Amino acid sequence: MILVTVIMAMVTAGNSVSMWVAFHACLGTALVAASASVMNQWLERDRDAVMNRTCRRPLPSGNVASSQAAGMGWVLVLVGSVYLAVFVNLPTMWCGLATWGLYVWVYTPLKMLSWTNTLVGTLPGALPVWMGWTAAEGSLIDVRAWILLGVVVAWQLPHFMAIAYMYREQYAAAGYKMITVTDPSGRGAAWHAILGSLALIVLAVLSVPPVGLFASLLTVCAVAVALWQTVAAIRFVRAPDMKTARRMLHVSLLHLPLTMLLILLSYWIR
């Protein structure tokens, strides 16, 4: 999903990008993202052992030693960052390091301290969009770069609030301060999901502007997809349970790729 947003951003930036630059950007991003995942699992290895959904990961299961994971994490981020600097450009490297630092050293420890961790985590979750944008040598002062960032930020709210509710008991057992732990009713998570979904409706119009007949049709489709997500969030807030949470999660998994496709189509017809 990360690499899909990177490619989408490169195309939408509107500059000519060679296949080799796109390949290098995706490979470098994959290395940095892999490092973030490894370091996250290294930092959370003891708590992962408590949760059924994570106890079979390489570290808690004993298949990989803690020192091996830490070493792999550092090597991956160093190699990935240098790779992006050499084969893509420095702005992309800095965006990658910002993503990595926020995810590993801000979002991950914040999960033990405050329910706001999910809100903070939306930023490193969305910054790969800017990695693709800068790889295409697009300027970050371009409003379109901020709109695309907003789409991925807002999308994460219904997506991760659904996950937080579905695994709230396991999160509580592991000591995580998720909003579904501090508010087990699920109402708080549901309202965050609704706010994110409503933001997606506005961002659908901004990211797929109706500048022609076919473009207007694409805008209607983008708004319809966002409304679909909003309906799922409303159903969740009206009756928070595993069924409505899982439904909201499934809709989110379709929402992002569909929206990205519509954004690309709107770019190609301009």
Image: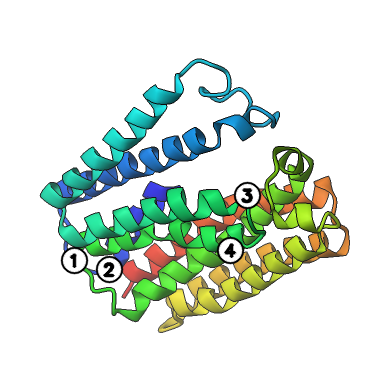
For disc 3, the neighbor class at 10 Å (few under 14, some 14 to 19, many from 20) is some
Q: Which quadrant holds residue 231?
A: bottom right
Between the C-alphas of marks 4 and 3, the distance is: 14 Å
Q: Nearer the viewer, mark 4 or mark 1?
A: 4
Q: Who comes first in sequence, dot 4 or dot 2? A: 2
Nearer to us in this view, 264 or 70: 70
- Residue with the most extreme bottom position: 211
Question: Of helix, strand and loop, which one carries label 2?
Answer: loop
Q: Is residue 118 rendered to the left or right of residue 35?
A: right
Amino acid of disc 1: Glu
Amino acid of disc 2: Ala
Percent position of residue 90, x then y: 17, 59
Q: Nearer the viewer, mark 3 or mark 2?
A: 3
Residue 231, above or below 52: below
Amino acid of disc 4: Leu
Q: Can you identify the residue that label 1 sits on?
A: 137
Nearer to us in this view, 144 or 182: 182
Q: Who comes first in sequence, dot 1 or dot 2? A: 2
Q: Nearer the viewer, mark 3 or mark 1?
A: 3
Question: Of helix, strand and loop, which one carries label 1?
Answer: loop
Q: Can you identify the residue that label 2 sits on?
A: 13
Q: Nearer the viewer, mark 4 or mark 2?
A: 4
Percent position of residue 46, x then y: 60, 30
- Colour setup of the view: rainbow
Between the C-alphas of marks 3 and 1, the distance is: 38 Å
Q: Can you identify the residue that label 3 sits on?
A: 112
Q: Can you identify the residue that label 4 sits on?
A: 119
Amino acid of disc 3: Met
Q: Who comes first in sequence, dot 3 or dot 2? A: 2
Question: Of helix, strand and loop, which one carries label 4?
Answer: helix
Nearer to us in this view, 109 or 51: 109
Between the C-alphas of marks 4 and 2, the distance is: 26 Å
